[in-house]
Amino acid sequence: MFQRTYTWMCSKVNSKYASLALGILFYLEAICFLPTDPMLIFYCIEKREYSLWFATIATIGSVFGGITSYMIGFFLWYQLGYQIIHNWLVNKMISADSFVFLCSQYKKYEYWAILVAGFTPIPYKAATLTAGFCKLSFIPFVLCSAIARGTRFFLIAIIMKKWGHHMKKTIDRYLHWVVIAILSAIILFLICWFYW
């Protein structure tokens, strides 16, 4: 089953819509929780010569998704803010207390918060939504997002371009174990995220 899925994904990386699909995926990642870094890694491993292109697409998609999330926080907060922050699904992604804490940190650290959230595993969507709510200046917000997300994705792309062929051999040889490790990491992250 894993081998069939892996083969199917390989065929999608080589389709003419691969870049569009990657861009949409990273756009959505900035709005709602999707673990997208493994997809960027997979794309870069399969087509190492396009690694920097894929990082560019991921950065653009993520920044535009961040802008959308910022706009939701900025324009819709007073109309829908209470419903958004007290929605059960949203509370699973970011609690009301976390949201208030992030806002206070923004007022203290401003753009460093965007740089840190954009580069680290801290949920980028929480940072962008809160940035809009806290009314951070738009242009510096976009620049900080582009710097942080670009640094993260280009770092992944450069590593995959240089050493991706070794990883591909490992994946081809130990696909089942690689899938189990990735799924375990995602499940562990989700458990920590929702219940910690």
Image: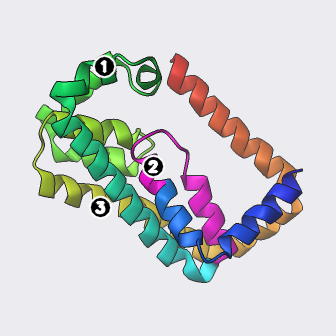
**Mark 3 or mark 1, which is nearer the start of the sequence?**
1
Q: Tell me the distance, in whole angstroms, between the alpha carbons under discs 1 and 2.
A: 21 Å
Whether residues under marks 1 and 3 lie with C-beta atoms below 8 angstroms apart, the answer is no
Front residue of 23 and 56: 23
Answer with left or right where residue 60 lies relative to residue 140. right
The answer to whether residue 66 is seen in the rendering is yes
Which residue is drawn at the image coordinates 51% and 71% (left, top)?
Answer: 54
Res 144 quadrant in image: bottom left
Residue 83 image label: 1
The crowding category of the residue bearing disc 2, from other C-alpha atoms within 10 Å (few below 14, some 14 to 19, many at least 20), is many
- Residue 196 location (% of width, % of height): 50, 18
Front residue of 59 and 90: 90
Residue 28 image label: 2
- Residue 21 location (% of width, % of height): 55, 63
Please identify the residue farthest to the front as the structure is shown: 79
The answer to whether residue 101 is seen in the rendering is no
Q: Which residues are magenta?
A: 26-47
Q: Nearer the viewer, mark 2 or mark 3?
A: 2
- Residue 59 location (% of width, % of height): 39, 63
Which residue is drawn at the image coordinates 30% and 16% (left, top)?
Answer: 97
> Which residue does the numbered mark 3 point to in the structure image?
146
Dot 1: element: helix
Magenta-colored stretch includes residue 31: yes
Name the colour scheme: rainbow
At label 3, the amino acid type is Ala
Main SS class of the magenta portion in the image: helix
Q: Tell me the distance, in whole angstroms, between the alpha carbons under discs 2 and 3.
A: 16 Å
Res 10 quadrant in image: bottom right
Answer with left or right where residue 69 lies relative to residue 174. left
